[in-house]
Amino acid sequence: MRRLRFRPWCNLLLFILPLVAVGPAARVLAAAPENRAATDVQPAPGGSGFDVAAATAAYLAKVPLEQRQRSDAYFEGGYWLILWDFLGGAAVIWFLLASRWSAAMRDRAERLTRLKSLQAALYWAQFILVQSVLLSPLAVYEDYFREHTYHLSTQTFGLWLKDQVTILAVNVVLGAILFPILYGVLRRVRSWWLWGALVATVFVMFVQLIAPVFLFPLLNRYTRLEDESIRGPILSLARANGISAADVYVFDASRQTTRVSANVSGFLGTQRISLNDNMLKRCSLPEIEAAMGHEMGHFILHHPYEGSALTGMVIVAGLAFLRRSFDGVLRRFGSRWRVSGVGDLAGLPLLLLLFSVYLFALTPVTNSFTRTLEAEADLFGLNAAGQPDGAAEVALKLGEYRKLDPGPLEEIIFFDHPSGRSRIFTAMRWKAEQLNRAERRASSAR
């Protein structure tokens, strides 16, 4: 799936999903030895003669220089977009507060209804519409023109805009559910930061669990995979790993992007195995099995649930930060902005801004959380599917929009997945050990 950039103020899904990205993420440190130094090894011991470093270098050499430069430029440009997204969102929020637009939206919601819950929903609808319009130039450049420049998007502007409207509508509905509950806590409970964190964590878990089955189909059409030569091996792999899904689905991502992706999702009987049509068109069966083994690894290793627990910790710490920082800012600017306290709807932009500062500072940590779980799923996929060369080929395809060979510090700070070099090295190391094992078995049988 396409990486979601850090833009939590722009819409509710991108407010929640960076936390869910701490959700598919659960460790502080990246998995060593996944860096350039780790590839400086000699042929695997045991006599197979398979040189892991040379095999890794051979795969990386398959990428033409022009393609490598293009993907590096795309990914490195994303480093700056993290900053511009943050600054752009912060500027819009500051404008809404300083101009008293936020207070005016609150007043309008209060005039329309006396019900506090409906006031929160109405305020949220106004807020997200206004900030979406104000940030639309950045979104059009970043998500439409830039994607076309790097040959990653297949959408016309009309279809892209339709998808953005759909996402906006979903955000309005999700916010109308969350914020009445959250503001009820903020107004009534002294330890609002703790109970608010509980509400937010439960909501993040809820969205994380339902999104693949109920929300993603709003953007793409899901159909049953009919090709038994691919469907059969995927379901066999699922059964061998205790996944009870009865079918495999294909979604039409080619209407939006050239990227390959897949996922295994669901709960309480809604398990679903899905892959996009780009993967069907562009990948061989060993590549598909390698990718599905990775996705099944996330599911079997309980990464979503494991990550949700960590998400709760991040939210608790974040709201504790808000408890201290919000009051300090409000004492200086509250009367000027017509914001009376934490339970005042007009203060929502300030809450989001401060929480965004907190998440922005945590970017290297949350990226490392995610990257480590992705490395765990890589290893699970190799052991489950037994397709190291398929895994290496998929890593090269993902390298069309991710830098294949970053420096170690660069990978720690900016990568929420292991780099292409790291993934290929892991696959080749696994292959070498399997060759050694086969050789030992053959020797003992003589």
Image (cartoon, rainbow, N blue to C red):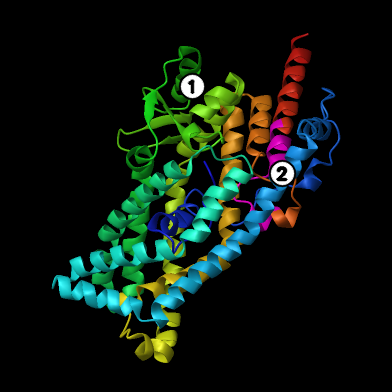
Query: Identity of the amino acid at label 2?
Result: Arg
Q: Residue at x 84, y 32 (%)?
A: 54
User: Which image quadrant for residue 334?
Assistant: bottom left
Q: Residue at x 33, y 63 (%)?
A: 198
| Disc 1 versus disc 2: nearer the observer | 2
Magenta part mainly helix, strand or loop?
helix
Percent position of residue 287, x then y: 60, 25
Separation of marks 1 and 2 at Cα, in angstroms: 33 Å
Image height of 160 relative to 224, above or below: below
Q: Which residue is mark 2?
A: 70
User: Which image quadrant for residue 50?
Assistant: top right
Sequence order check: which comes first, mark 1 or mark 2? 2
Helix or strand or loop: what does disc 2 sit on? Answer: helix
Q: Which residues are magenta?
A: 411-427
Percent position of residue 137, x then y: 50, 60
Q: Which residue is mark 1?
A: 234
In the image, 187: left or right of 155?
A: left
Query: Identity of the amino acid at label 1?
Result: Ile
Out of 41 and 138, give the one closest to the viewer.
Answer: 138
Determine contact: label 1, label 2, CB under 8 Å.
no
In the image, 82: left or right of 112?
A: right
Out of 210 and 127, give the one closest to the viewer.
Answer: 127
- Farthest-out residue, top: 446
Percent position of residue 161, x then y: 42, 48
Residue 250 magenta: no
In the image, 86: left or right of 127?
A: right
